[in-house]
Amino acid sequence: MKNKILFGVSLLFGLMYINAGLNKFFNYMPPPKDMPPELVKLMTAFMQIEWLMPLVGVIEIVGGLLFIPAKTRALGAIIILPVMVGVLLTNIFNAPSGLPIAGVMMLVNIWVIIENRHKYQPMLTK
């Protein structure tokens, strides 16, 4: 039962990140009209670095794809982690209205990392 729940949550998580990554390239989701001014300023600064958003998009797509199958989920969770930390910090400091979703997403990522801790163990031992 736990594996089925984990797969369902991982599927949704992966699809959300694939969608976010694809949006970085195709811009099919317009930004909200009521974005806080601090977030608009931050996103404008990010857009000035031409390679940053495509890089984040590729990481989101690859991480999302790897997050779905159980065999590659541990790698997907680690690839997505830096992006997830950025999303969480952005929501904490600039857009608190998105914090519940970002918090749940971070908890899912941490859950997957904890469930796969045995796969990371060889990197941590000598």
Image (spheres, rainbow, N blue to C red):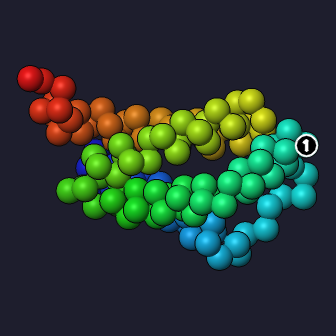
* Residue located at (26% from left, 37% from top): 115
* Residue located at (35% from left, 52% from top): 76
Q: In what quadrant of the picture does the C terminus appear?
A: top left
- The image shows residue 101, relative to residue 125, as above or below, that is below
Residue type marked 1: Pro
Number of on-image labels: 1
Q: Position of residue 31 (x, y in %)?
A: 80, 61
- The image shows residue 1, relative to residue 90, as above or below, that is below
Q: Is residue 69 left or right of residue 11?
A: left
- The image shows residue 17, relative to residue 1, as above or below, that is below
Q: Position of residue 98 (x, y in %)?
A: 72, 42
Residue 17 visible in the shown view: no
Q: Position of residue 19 (x, y in %)?
A: 56, 67
Closer to the camera in the image, 17 or 53: 53
Closer to the camera in the image, 17 or 4: 17
The quadrant in which residue 14 appears is bottom left
Callout 1 secondary element: helix
* Residue located at (20% from left, 56% from top): 71
The quadrant in which residue 110 appears is top left
Residue 81 visible in the shown view: yes
- The image shows residue 50, relative to residue 41, as above or below, that is below
The quadrant in which residue 65 appears is bottom left
Q: Mark 1 = which residue?
A: 37
Closer to the camera in the image, 50 or 31: 50
Q: Position of residue 74 (x, y in %)?
A: 28, 46
Give the residue furthest to the top: 126
Task: Characterize the local packing of mark 1: few (<14), some (14-19) or many (20 or more) Cα atoms within 10 angstroms.
Answer: few
* Residue located at (53% from left, 42% from top): 84
